[in-house]
Amino acid sequence: MRKTVLTIVVALCSIATFAQYNIDRLLIIGRNALYFEDYVLSIQYFNQAITSKPYLYEPWFYRAVAKYNLDDFTGAEADCSQAIKINPFITNVYELRGLARIQQQKYSDAITDYNRALKYDPENQSLWHNRALCRIQNKEYDQALAELDTMLTRWKRYARGYSMQAEVYIHKQDTAKAIKSLNQSVDIDPYESSTWQALASISLSRKKWKDAEKNLDRAIHLQPKNVANYLNRALARINQNNLRGTMADYDMALDLDPNNFLGHYNRGLLRAQVGDDNRAITDFDFVLHLEPENLMALYNRALLLDKTGNLRGAIRDYTKVIEQFPNFWTGLQSRASCYRRLGMTKQAEADEFRVYKAQLYKSLYGIQPRLNKKQLRKRSDKDLEKYNQLVVADEQEMEHEYKNEYRGRVQNRQADLDQMPMYELSFERKRSEVESYVPYDRLVDAFNSTTPTAKSLCVTSSTPILDERSTRTYFDLIASLSAELTITTDERKAMPVLLRRAVAYTVVQNLQDAIEDLTSCLAVDSLSPLPYWQRAACRMKQVNIMISSESRNKEAVDMKLVTIIDDLDRAARLNPECAYVYYNRGVAYSHRDDLDKAIADFDRALALDPNLAEAYYNRGLAFLRQKNVEKAIADLSKAGESGLYKAYGIIKKHAKK
């Protein structure tokens, strides 16, 4: 009896250990998927973990991270709340729930979360930053100032703190103190675009057009894709009679945001002023497509249609305006003129009689004002007498940038000198930035020929993010391949099935199981280069995740890189004509800071395939790290020319240096 009980206890312990192992594996794979932005896939893994062990806070928290990145802020908040019920002492959960609540404009609730988080982590600058911004949104200006004073006492060189302080002073209408705070921010960090933007807003409000333009020049240099900066600089330029510069700014703003209302409206007015009537009509057509009942735009288009001879179109627009403002005498007189030119005397006389009665009874008669380009009106101002004034937004607000460690890829927190990733085997090929380039390897093609299936292997450096349907498809594929393996007794026949299952595991970010399958492949056939290549790529993904984690272990990373290089050495010996193997080894050497060997491998890759843009890009980064700027720029230029356009941003940043 005692022996039986002991056996049962041992069995139960084994089951518990196995279950815990499965949960840990699910969490690891889910976090891998999070790292590679496969948010839908990661949710599938965390769902399984929650179903198995709903009393663990980690899967709830990680699922909240995935939901937050999918803009499901309500779901993210609910998952964080559940995680807090399970374990109320984790700072990160309060921080994420605060961010989710901010996105729902629940600023008071977010402040509550940040208060709780700061009890456990009072030195966390991000928490102080976000709480202060929530105070500003709640119009709690005195409390915001008090908290900012505390922050700037602790972190005297915190530029963004001074910028937030300036915003509070602007809301309190203390412009002098706001300028002082902004100047302090600029002295500490002159590379923050929003600070120059705030200085420009103050200059615009004071009608110091030249100062506003200079500040906006700096803001645009630092943040060239911010539409609001171009629109504001256009206002500064037109008030300095710089029509060409104004038009260029409106053109650039609309290139960046083709649906921008203010850009089209103001460019339409400007085109009308310089006699470019037909293109002005095009702009007002677009404005009216966005806002069909916008009377200012209707009246402006009516005047332009009248001027260009489209009298029926002008009458249509005049009529819509007059229906809303029956006593708009200028519009009636203009419509009467159109009727007369079309020979519609009866309608013309009716409009003229209404105007005559208004004059007779000394009613108000709207005199059409001359265009004064220096007058501005708020977008909400519906006074038709201001039909030809440039429009500005109702409120000029400083942009709020909340400190966020959860949005997007983890590696995006690193510097801009991240390498392009390794090439790997996959069933999916994401449309590459180098669109005309299709990776090809003869051994991969030979493998597909000898084992024809519905899904063929391909070579790629970037697999697409899976949606829910694709995720289910891959889970079904893995189950199918696993079933095939259970009935296969011949090791040689099992090897291609193992390789395909390993590739499927890689696609769904189950890197450890992929590596185990690839190791099994090599146990059967140690002379096949494809498993070495794929195993190195999987291990490199693990290295990237290790590097991004807070508890980075340099020794573990170095050991993993040694095994990666060893795999790629073997792959290169077995397939010496494969450019991707040398390229991948160059990536691994770069991670070890062995730049000479990395450059030598990129050289070999480019000798075999001169169209390999990623090799030019990564070799350029290696040259940059060696301070060889001339060679770096040449390589980055070649990469940009081949389609890796982000290379130009690095060239721009480092060319002057």
Image: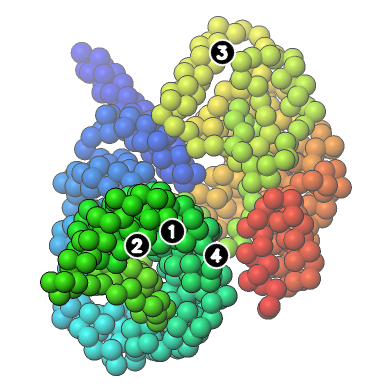
Position in image of residue 481 (x %, y %): 54, 16
Disc 2 marks which amino acid? Answer: Ser
Around disc 4, counting alpha carbons within 10 Å, would you say few (fewer than 14), some (14 to 19), or many (20 or more)? some
Q: Residues within 10 Å of mark 3 (few under 14, many from 20)?
A: some
Say which residue appears at 61% left-offset and 15% top-offset. 454
Mark 4 vs mark 1: in front: 1
Name the residue type under label 1: Asp
Q: Type of residue at label 4?
A: Asp
Q: Give the residue at mark 3.
A: 485
The residue lying toward the viewer, choosing from 167 and 209, is 209
Precedes in sequence: disc 4 or disc 1: 4
Which mark's residue is nearer the viewer, 4 or 3? 4
- Label whose residue precedes the other's in the sequence (4 or 3): 4
> What amino acid is at disc 3?
Leu
Q: Earlier in the sequence, mark 2 or mark 1?
A: 1
Mark 2 highlights which residue? 334
Closer to the camera, 448 or 60? 448
The secondary element bearing badge 2 is classed as: helix
CA distance separating discs 3 and 1: 78 Å
Q: Do callouts 3 and 2 mark residues in contact (Cβ within 8 Å)?
A: no
In the drawing, what numbered circle is on residue 306?
A: 1
Quadrant housing the C terminus: bottom right
The image shows residue 439, relative to residue 111, as above or below, that is above
